[in-house]
Image (cartoon, rainbow, N blue to C red):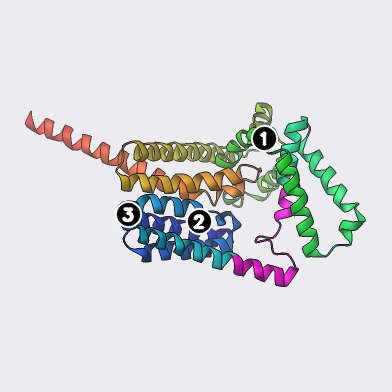
Amino acid sequence: SHMLYACHMPALLDLSLDAVRRPDALWHILLAAGTLGLAMLTRAAALYLWIPLCAVTAYAMWRRVSLIRVVAAIAIIGTVQGAVQMSWSARNEAISGNRTYAGMLGWHLVSFYAPLFIAKRDGTDPGDVKQSLTEAFASDPNYQAMSEGERERHLADQGMRLVKENWQYALLVIPDNIPKMFLGYPAEPLAVHLNEEHFSAWQDMARVRHETSFQADTWDISSRVELIRYYLDNSLLPLLGYGVFLKALNALVLLLAAVALIRMIALGTREERSVALMIFFVFGLLAGTALLTTQGRFRLPVMPAVSVPAAISLLLLLRFGATKFVRRGSRVNER
């Protein structure tokens, strides 16, 4: 599902950008809305992307086409969104008796979101909070007697209650998760090429870090020093270099994306602002949701919204460098 979603998201952004550049062509809107529907069927992260799509489409079309066409565009997006969401929810209800759009919602709320909020509130360990909540449900005979659909609804209700009661602590959770999601990296692509001894050493380290990552303190420098020492002691220099390179690359991509979006919003034409706003709102919605928990894999849905403006920024830098090179060459020729 991650790979299908990764295919749909760039297509959605491309079609959305076409739609805001050509607000008079409603078929661009229809294609964007249809692609969004396909993305929703692969990952629930796309569930609310119709909001920025509607908002930016209305902004791009306002006073450029008739009000009827603006309303028609919004209606197309809403109709496609409603058709996909309601049909999929109805399908889930028919199978499990639970109309929730995405499965595992309750489990994620209780196991990942709520423990982090409560731990920030009480100054305790998130792993201990998670274990306490899990044991409470496991020991509840009423919960054990429920059907699968009833359990999911119960977990979702209780998880949502805990999140709402402690929502303000999300402001403390998000900063902790920014480095984990945007600067983290998967070591597996390089680890599979290690020899048997080094691969076993990496597995031992990865297993321990995976088990403790949920409650790990992002700003604990000692754990980073310990990891570097482990790499050095076990001759895992390729993994260490790979990690340093990818962290630097990820940080550079974020910086380039920020520069491009700020420039387009502050100095761009209305068309460029529409494009920048679409990317910015998609990024904000996806990242804001993903940063409430600690799973680095949630970065994947966000990356298309980061890579596009980063590529724009890099292209502008290359053009600027080429222009300076040509000007310098012409000056040399004049001399």
Q: Using the image, determine if residue 303 lies above or below residue 33.
A: above
Q: Amino acid at mark 3?
A: Arg
According to the image, label 3 marks what residue? 21
- Looking at the rendered structure, the secondary structure element under dot 3 is helix
Relative to residue 127, is residue 285 drawn left or right?
Answer: left
Q: Is residue 256 visible?
A: yes
> Dot 3: few (<14), some (14–19), or many (≥20) neighbours within 10 Å?
some
Relative to residue 20, is residue 44 drawn left or right?
Answer: right
Where does the image place residue 231, in percent across and percent down from the top left?
A: 64, 36
Q: Earlier in the sequence, mark 2 or mark 3?
A: 3
Q: CA distance from mark 1 to mark 3?
A: 38 Å
Q: Amino acid at mark 1?
A: Gln
Residues at marks 2 and 3 touching, judged by CB atoms closer than 8 Å: no
The C terminus lies in quadrant: top left
Residues at marks 1 and 3 touching, judged by CB atoms closer than 8 Å: no
Q: Earlier in the sequence, mark 1 or mark 3?
A: 3
**Which region is colored magenta?**
86-110
Residue 50 disc label: 2
Q: Earlier in the sequence, mark 2 or mark 1?
A: 2
Q: CA distance from mark 2 to mark 3?
A: 18 Å
Q: Using the image, determine if residue 12 lies above or below residue 255.
A: below
Q: Is residue 212 visible?
A: no
Q: Nearer the viewer, residue 216 or 225?
A: 216
Q: Amino acid at mark 2?
A: Trp
**Residue for point 70% across, 40% down:** 213
Q: Quadrant of residue 224?
A: top right
Residue 205 disc label: none
- Looking at the rendered structure, the secondary structure element under dot 2 is helix
> Dot 2: few (<14), some (14–19), or many (≥20) neighbours within 10 Å?
many
According to the image, label 1 marks what residue? 168
- Looking at the rendered structure, the secondary structure element under dot 1 is helix
Is 93 inside the magenta-drawn segment?
yes
